[in-house]
Amino acid sequence: MIIRETEDSFIMIKQHDHAYVSGETIKHVSRNLLKSDLFIDDFVYASHQHDRSWIELDDTPIWNDGKQIPFTFSDYPLLPKLAFYQIGLDEIEEANLYAALLCSLHFCSFFAKSKDPDCLQFLQDEASRQKKIRKELPKLDEELLIQHFQLLQLSDNLSLYFCLNEPGVDKESEHPWFRDGFKNTESFHPGNHKLLARWVNEHEVTFDAYPFETDFHVTLPYKKVDKATIRKLGIAEAYGESKLEEHSILIRK
């Protein structure tokens, strides 16, 4: 789950729903930014599916006693998270080799500096997967793959930007991950620095250098789960009884 806490509730967003929004943003990326249109459908598929590992984990949220909030994607127990990452990547690989390669690279970036033995084993297993896929895609354009990887990260981060920030928040009060721009986006900015987004109001987001073809809307599903209801029923039942809502966002120049 992606969690944003308010005074009396938790805004809770399923990872697979967030990933769908990520994929929808990719559909609108300016083609002038891309080396070519090769693998474009596979790239969009990767963005839509990159968090499918979380589908089962997000069915029933669990409570983090230490922090007194539901477990989030960033602090979820490591071993089940790694196991489900690999399950999700297996499913993506079965459907689309190029998407699996992109998503594997994406997941491995999370643990690039880790010394944890379980993370190192995950990285080793994924290196084997990536090597095998590269053999099956002999005409792979590595430069284009890097572009797609960087844009996958941008789409992921932009969707997280929608999820983790209070809609309409001032730039200075944004979630710290995004205040200084999105990582690895310098090559998509004419000034060769990180792309910066900001909220215009509760329903509109813009960029300092617009990386998309046109303006477009996305819709983010979420549940607002009342803290008093959690104390009464527990997190799983409180989440189940909460109404599914939607927030519409216009991404514009």
Image (tube, helix red, strand yellow):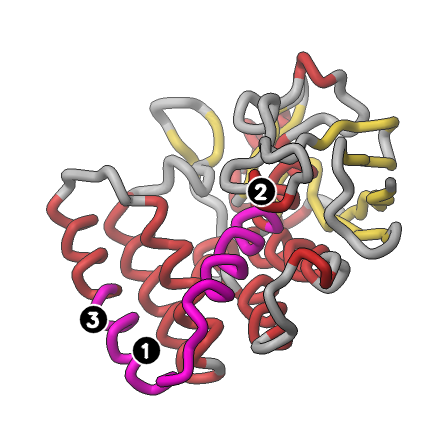
Membership of 57 in magenta stretch: no
Q: 51 or 236, which lies in front? A: 51
| View extreme (top): residue | 172
User: Dot 2 corresponds to which residue?
Assistant: 157
What residue do we see at 81% from left, 35% from top? Answer: 206
To which residue does mark 1 refer?
Answer: 134
SS state under label 2: helix
Crowd band around label 1 with a 10 angstrom C-alpha radius: few (<14), some (14–19), many (20+): some
Residue found at the very far left of the displayed protein: 117
- Quadrant of the rendered image containing residue 157: top right
Element type at marker 1?
A: helix
Q: Amino acid at mark 2?
A: Asn
Q: Quadrant of residue 103?
A: bottom left
SS for dot 3: helix
Residue interval drawn in magenta = 127-155
Q: Is the residue marked by circle 2 packed among few (<14), some (14-19), or many (20+) residues within 10 Å?
A: some
